[in-house]
Amino acid sequence: MATISSWNVTGMTCGHCVASVTEEIQEIPGVESVDVVLESGAVTVTSAEPLDRAAVESAVAEAGYQLA
């Protein structure tokens, strides 16, 4: 059964930001889909099993942003 997790990312200002965050989170093993809303900074991730916050935090940092 899929797990849905939500976080907020700060610092995104454009479509490129959204693409970068999406791309990095999709590289986490088990991630099935990523939905990023630029206006609110909301990130919803569907994965095969619960994700470790540190893994998501690291992926977001790799894209140049941080979890709120």
Image (cartoon, rainbow, N blue to C red):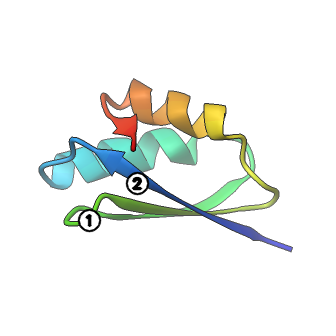
Residue 6: x percent and y percent?
A: 54, 62
Q: Which residue is mark 1?
A: 40
Q: Residue at x 26, y 65 (%)?
A: 40
Residue 24: x percent and y percent?
A: 47, 38
- Residue neighbourhood size for the residue with mark 1, other residues' Cα within 10 Å, grouped as few (<14), some (14–19), many (≥20): few
Q: Secondary structure at mark 2?
A: strand
Q: Which quadrant: the C terminus?
A: top left
Whichever of labels 2 and 1 marks the residue nearer the N terminus, that label is 2
Residues 27 and 35: in front is: 35
Q: From this viewpoint, which residue is outermost toward the left? A: 13
Q: From this viewpoint, which residue is outermost toward the right? A: 1
Amino acid type at image mark 2: Asn
For the residues labelled 2 and 1, the Cα–Cα distance comes to 8 Å
Q: Residue at x 23, y 61 (%)?
A: 38
Q: Which residue is mark 2?
A: 8
- Up-down relation of residue 2 to residue 67 (above or below): below
Residue 56: x percent and y percent?
A: 57, 39
On screen, residue 41 versus residue 25, left or right, reads left
